[in-house]
């Protein structure tokens, strides 16, 4: 006689749970993460004031609409759309934003924040 099969659900996804519910739960967990002040601002509210190119990494100073300065480096989270500082160059900072379009697909966009031209 063949032994009876025993199903062990440990560490397996629930086959009856909606994917939409699971996705919503994941998004809610992400939103629970406390945001830094720079993550609450739109990138358009920031102006680039200074860039420091150094052997231990590049840094930049951005100012918000109140005039307060914030030091950023590669990897700094910035902007409302999950932006992250990608590169700091001689005259600009490149920020990569990732967001979901209306179809729920992940979209990635690079935004350049340039130093103001000096006359």
Image: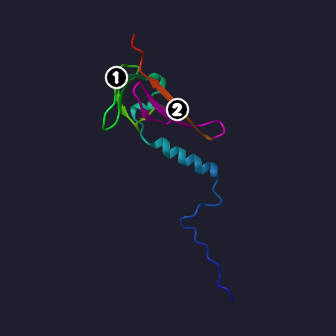
* Of the image marks 1 and 2, the number of the one nearer the N terminus: 1
Q: Is 94 contained in the magenta span?
A: yes
List the residue tagged with mark 1: 68
Above-or-below relation of 43 to 74: above
User: Is there a contact, CB below 8 Å, between mark 1 and mark 2?
Assistant: no
Q: Is 39 contained in the magenta span?
A: no
Residue occupying image coordinates x 52% and y 32%: 110
In the displayed orientation, state which residue is furthest to the bottom: 1
Highlighted magenta segment, given as a residue range: 80-104
List the residue tagged with mark 2: 110
Above-or-below relation of 57 to 2: above
Direction from residue 100 to residue 73 in the image, left or right: left
Residue occupying image coordinates x 41% and y 20%: 65
Query: Could you tell me which secondary element the residue under label 1 belongs to?
Result: loop
Residue occupying image coordinates x 39% and y 13%: 118
Toward the viewer: 23 or 117? 117
Name the image quarter holding residue 2: bottom right
Neighbourhood count class around disc 1 (C-alpha, 10 Å): few under 14, some 14–19, many 20 upward = few
Picture coordinates of residue 12, whole percent (x, y): 57, 64
Name the main secondary structure of what is drawn in magenta: strand
Q: Quadrant of the C terminus?
A: top left
Total numbered labels? 2
Direction from residue 73 to residue 101 in the image, left or right: right
Direction from residue 113 to residue 52 in the image, left or right: left
Picture coordinates of residue 4, whole percent (x, y): 65, 81
In the image, which is nearer the foreground, mark 1 or mark 2? 2
Picture coordinates of residue 89, whole percent (x, y): 41, 30
């Amino acid at each position: 006689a063949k032994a009876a099969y025993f199903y062990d659900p440990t560490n397996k996804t629930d086959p009856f749970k909606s994917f939409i519910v699971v996705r919503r739960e994941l998004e809610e967990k992400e939103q629970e993460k406390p945001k830094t002040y720079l993550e609450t601002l739109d990138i358009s509210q920031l102006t680039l004031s200074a860039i420091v190119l150094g052997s231990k990494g590049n840094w930049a100073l951005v100012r918000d609409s109140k005039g307060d300065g914030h030091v950023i480096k590669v990897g700094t989270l910035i902007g409302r759309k999950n932006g992250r500082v990608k590169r700091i160059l001689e005259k600009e900072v490149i920020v990569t934003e990732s967001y979901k379009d209306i179809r729920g697909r992940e979209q990635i966009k690079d935004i350049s924040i340039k130093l103001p031209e000096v006359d």
